[in-house]
Amino acid sequence: MQSLTVAPHPTTLHRTTRLLRAVPHTPLPICPTSPWTPPSPLCSPLKLPRVPSRSLRSASPGASNLTVRASGDGDGSGSGASSSTRRSAARRSRQYSSSVQEASGGRRGGRSGGASNGGVEVDTELIGIGAMLLAVGAGIWGVSRFLARGGIGSSADSDEEGEGSGGRRDSSSSAGDDKEKQKKWRQQSMAKVRELAQQLRSFKTVDLSGKSLGDEGFKYLAESLAFNNSVESVDFSNNGIGPEGVKALTEALATNAYLKTLNLSGNMIGDEGAKVLAGIMEQNRGVQTLQLSSNGIGDEGMRALADMLKKNEAMVCLEMNNNGIEYEGCAALADALASTKSLRSLHLNGNYAGTLGASALAKGLQENKSLRELHFNGNGVGDEGARVLASGLLAHKGKLVTIDLSNNSMGSKGAAHIAEVIKKSRSLQWLNLYMNDFGDKGAERIADALKRNKSIATIDLGGNNIHAEGIAAICDALKENSTITTLELGYNPIGPDGAKALADTVKFHGNVETLRLGWCKIGVKGAEYMADALKYNNTINTLDLRANALGDEGRPSWLSA
């Protein structure tokens, strides 16, 4: 019993959404405290014990108060009275000091009589206690400062060095910390690079993509390739490698004859790096697959690589997808195609060839005998470009097996030209015409050609605005064609009628094993037609019905078994 297999198509861009969980950030306190944990001394300044507030008039029994009359107090006797008062106060103060020195045990010093005129009263006992507390407080403060500075041998021995010297110490300390961090980071980086270098010496296939090597890290690894006789395939893609990094390959590839596949895609090589690499590869006889996609290489860099292809007799596959190659680059490449005898696979997807570039490439194809795969999607060749390309493909002296011309805005006229290639080809097995807006007329021309073709196994006609009328023509072709095993028709509005035509065809005809009808608006009715067809068909093992508004009604239980 067949089963529904939902499988993505390689030519369809699938967007993956990564859900990033937002984690609330709660900053920790510098010195966390809790009700049961006393605050750290680093959190709060040192607090000396406070003397409880007391009345200036002592309440001690039997103790007399020293009363000093300040200027302007009491009866307003003026400065004359105040001078005699000051002399009297000084005399009584000396008497108090003598009595304190003579005191012993718990006995307090004698009392001095008060002045006859009233004033501010000072508790002599409080003066002694306050002095003692101040001394204790000063001692505690000194000890705390000593400990805060780190004790004996601390670099901060005196507060008198001032903010300037402190700022200089902080600055030099910060600079030292930065240097130490940089040193540690470099040590860790080099340790990682040495680990990667060990992989190069230990395995035949090594994936070092996305390691953020940069030029410096890549130079180190390139050196390890020089006399390496184990690794055959290495992937350095997406590592921020520029022209300077590529130069490090000069010696490595000059002596290494074992490396077969070198992937440098997704870097920053540019035209300058492409020139350097071309010079290296002219002498290299080991590398057979060179991948340089997404490197910002334009016509100038492509010219250098094309000249390399004329001299290099080992290169089998060159990938230049998603660069900036236009007409001049295509013309240089066409010249190389006419002379190369080794190149089997050429990838130029996503460049800017246009009609002129396609015309130039067609001339190279006419003289080429070695090419087996041509990937030329997303170059905007149009109907005229399709015409000249078709002429080059028809005149090709070799045996092309794979052709990708998807997303090239060729239209129904372009489809007619490609149909001629399909009719006459005896080697073509894989053809991608996805997203070209052929319409029903273009589909009819392609279908007519498929009736005569005896080699194509996989054909992609998705995204070409084909309706039920065009599908009917394709169904007629399937009844006569015995080689097609994979048919992609996704993103065409064939509707329930188109689904019925296909269902009636695959019931008893054809050898189709994979049928893709995603996003075809077939609805529940169309799904029922296909379900009925699968009861009789014994070849289909993959049926793609995604995004057709089926709901539960369009999913019979036996289909998901």
Image: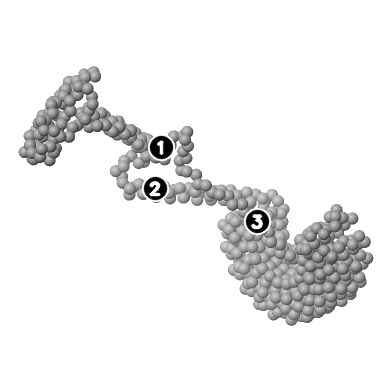
Q: Amino acid at mark 2?
A: Asp
Q: Where residue 70 appears, x then y in whole percent? A: 14, 37
Badge 2: how crowded within 10 Å, few (<14), some, or many (20+)?
few
Q: Where residue 288 appears, x then y in whole percent? A: 73, 63
Please identify, in this view, whether the residue under mark 2 or under mark 3 is nearer the observer: 3
Q: Which residue is located at x 78 percent, y 76 percent?
A: 438
- Cα separation, mark 1 vs mark 3, equals 46 Å
- Which residue matches tag 1? 41
User: Front-most of 337 and 356?
Assistant: 356
Q: Amino acid at mark 1?
A: Pro
Q: Which residue is located at x 79 percent, y 67 percent?
A: 521
84 w.r.t. 446: above or below: above
Q: Residue 18 got which mark?
A: 3
Q: Which element carries disc 3, helix, strand or loop?
A: loop
- The answer to which of marks 2 and 3 sits earlier in the sequence is 3
- Cα separation, mark 1 vs mark 2, equals 22 Å
- Which residue matches tag 2? 170
Q: Where residue 549 appears, x then y in whole percent? A: 78, 63
Q: Which element carries disc 1, helix, strand or loop?
A: loop
- The answer to which of marks 1 and 2 sits earlier in the sequence is 1
Q: Residue 28 got which mark?
A: none
C-beta proximity under 8 Å, tags 1 and 2: no
Residue 226 seen in the current view: no
